[in-house]
Image (cartoon, grey):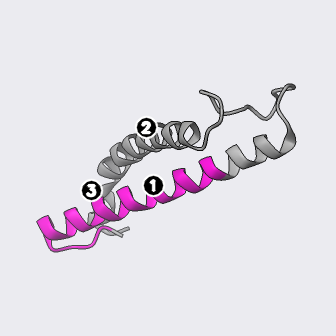
Amino acid sequence: MKASKIAYKPVGLALGAVSGALAGAVFKQVWKAVGHDEDAPDATDQDRKWREVMLAATLQGAIFSAVKAAVDRGGATAVHRLTGTWPG
C-alpha cells in the first residue's frame, strides 16, 4: 500500500463522519420540502404506506451517496493540491 494511501486514511475517516452528518441534515431538509412529515418513515412504521417508505429510503440513499462522493472527491483534491500526490 502506498504511503499516501496510509496517510490519507485518518483524513478519509474524518471526512466520512462529516459527510454522514451533512447528508443527514440535507435529507431532513429535502424531506420537509417535499411536503412530508417532519421525520422520514422507518421501514417498520406500521402507519406509513410502502410507497412512502420506499421513496424515503431511495431519496436518502441517493443523497448520502452524492454527498459522500462530493466530500471524498473534495478531500482527495485538497490533499493532491497540498502534497502533489493523489491519495487513491
Query: In front: 17, or 51?
Result: 51
Q: Which residue is at the far front?
A: 35
Q: Which residue is mark 2?
A: 21
Residue 86: say if magenta.
yes
Say if 14 sits above or below 46 in the image.
below
Residue at (87% x, 26% y) in the render: 46
Q: Amino acid at mark 2?
A: Ala
Residue 8's spot in the image, x, y percent?
29, 57
Instruction: Measure the alpha-carbon separation of dots 2 and 3.
Output: 23 Å
Residue 51: say if magenta.
no
Packing grade of label 1 (10 A; few <14, some 14-19, many >=20) is many
Residue at (53% x, 44% y) in the render: 30
Closer to the chain start, of discs 1 and 2, is 2
Say if 71 sits above or below 43 in the image.
below
Q: Is residue 52 left or right of residue 74?
A: right
Q: Which mark is residue 7?
A: 3
Residue 47's spot in the image, x, y percent?
85, 25
Badge 3 marks a residue whose secondary structure is: helix
Q: Which mark is residue 26?
A: none
Instruction: Measure the alpha-carbon separation of dots 1 and 2.
Output: 10 Å
- The segment highlighted magenta reads 59-87
Closer to the chain start, of discs 1 and 3, is 3
Q: Is residue 73 left or right of residue 45?
A: left
Q: Is residue 44 left or right of residue 4?
A: right
Q: Nearer the viewer, mark 1 or mark 3?
A: 1
Q: Amino acid at mark 1?
A: Lys
Q: Which residue is at the far left?
A: 82
Query: In front: 58, or 79?
Result: 58
Q: Which residue is mark 1?
A: 68
Q: Amino acid at mark 3?
A: Ala
For the residues bearing labels 1 and 3, Cβ distance under 8 angstroms: no
**Which quadrant of the rendered structure holds the N terminus?**
bottom left
